[in-house]
Image (spheres, rainbow, N blue to C red):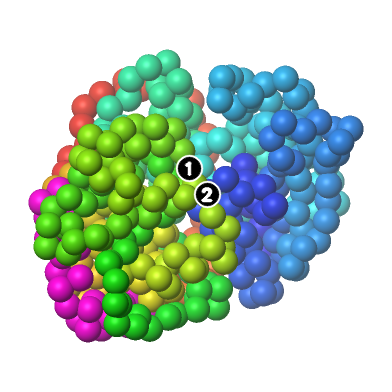
Amino acid sequence: MKILLVSWEYPPVVIGGLGRHVHHLATELAMAGHDVVVLSRRPTATDPHSHPTTDEVTEGVRVIAAAEDPHEFTFGTDMMAWTLAMGHAMVRAGLGLADWQPDVVHAHDWLVAHPAIALAQFFDVPLVSTIHATEAGRHSGWVSGAVSRQVHALESWLVRQSDSLIACSSSMRDEISTLFGPELADVSVIPNGIDTDGWPFAVRRPRSGPAELLYFGRLEYEKGVHDAIAALPRIRRTHPGTTLTVAGDGTQLDFLKAQARRHKVLKATNFVGRVDHSQLLTLLHRADAAVLPSHYEPFGIVALEAAAAGAPLVTSSAGGLGEAVIDGVTGLSHPPSDVAALSAAARAVLDSPAAAQQRARAARERLTSDFAWQTVAAETSQVYLAAKRAERRPHPRRPIVERPLPDR
C-alpha cells in the first residue's frame, strides 16, 4: 500500500513518545514492503530560510518536513494559532505530492487534524486516526478553559471525520467512545510497540547500600510523581536511606520540589532533568524499581522501556498501564492516587529482590511477543486494508462533556 502518515513530530523533531511511535511504525511498515511517506515539520522556532521544507528518504521512508511559516507563533502562548499555522504549512507540503497518490492517510493525534482531514479529502482516500490521548483524560474527565475546550473540539472533529480509529489500549477505546460516541467508526485496539534491541536487559546484583527508586517521564500532574514523593517517607521507615531519582522535565518541576520539601525528603529526591538514552539506561540498570504512579495513562510506553531494561516495575493500574503490566506477574500495581498502596508495593519489591527479578524477566519475555513492532505494523496494515472512505456528513455542534470519566 501507499501510506501517508501525518504527525507533528518525527525524528529529529521528537517531543515525546508519539514521535518514537510514528518512527518505529513507519520504518516497520517500509520493511514490510509498503510505500511510506511521513509528513511532519521542521523544528520549533525556525523559519523557511534557515530550515526550508525537506523531502528525503531515511531508513526506507520518504520524510517530508514542512518549514515553519509564518514563524511568529509560539506553542506555549499561541497554541491554537501555532497549530493552525503548522497545519497550513503541512497541507501545502502535502499538496506537493503530485507524483504520489496515497491509498490511506493516517493521522496521529489532534494537532494534525486539519492537514490530515484536508489531504484525505483531496486524495479521496480513507482517513485512519490513532488517538494517543484526550484532553478530557489528561484532566480527569473535565474540560474547562478556552484552550482545553478547543482541543476537545478538534479531537471530536478528527474522531468523527475518521473512517477507522486506533486506540493503544482497551481503556483508551472506552474513553474515546464515552467522550465522542455514538456513531463512530470502528475502533481497533493496537498496543504501542518497543524495540528491545535498544534496551539491553540487566540482571540486578545484590545491593550493599541504600535502595534506589526511579521515575522517568514527563513532569506533569497526571503522571502522579507527587505520589511517589509522598510515599518516600513511608518507604524509608522500613528501608532507611532509600532515594528517588526523578528524570524528566515538565510544568510541575517546582511543584514537585515543593512536595519533596513538604514531606522532608528533598535531599533524598534527586531531580536530574531530561536525560539521553544512554543516561536513562544507566539509571534503569541501577534502580531497584521503576516507579510509575500515573493518574492517567492511555498506554504507558515508559513501563515497556523499563521492563525491557530489566527494572522491576511498580506502577499504578491507570488506563493502559493496567493492561501493559500484569499485577504480580510482570510487576506490582496499585490503584491510582493511593499512596499507601504505592508504598506497600515498593516495599514488597525491596523486601524480595529475587521475586522482583523473576517478575522483571517475565515482563521482558512478554515484550518480544505482545509488543513487537512487527506485530504492531502488521495489525495496523490490516486496519488500512479494511478502512473505506465513508460519505461525509456535516456534524452538528456537540455539547462538551464536563464530568469525570468513569473509573477505569
Viewer-closest of 257 and 158 = 257
- Figure quadrant of the N terminus: bottom right
- In the rendered image, the vertical position of residue 43 relative to residue 362, given as above or below: above
Asked whether, in this view, residue 2 is left or right of residue 218, the answer is right
Query: Residue 297 location, x and y as percent?
Result: 33, 49
The disc placed on residue 274 is: 2
In primary-sequence order, the first of circles 2 and 1 is 1
Q: Which mark is residue 249?
A: 1
- Horizontal side of 216 relative to 144 (left or right) equals right
Q: Residue at x 59, y 27 (%)?
A: 75
Name the main secondary structure of what is drawn in magenta: helix
Instruction: Write the start and end of the magenta stretch as one range.
Output: 339-366
* Image position of 236 with respect to 88: above or below: below
Whether residue 133 is visible here, answered yes or no, is yes
* Left or right position of 106 against 315: right
Percent position of residue 394, x then y: 48, 25
Q: Amino acid at mark 1?
A: Asp
User: Which residue is rendered at x = 54% and y = 68% of the image?
Assistant: 377
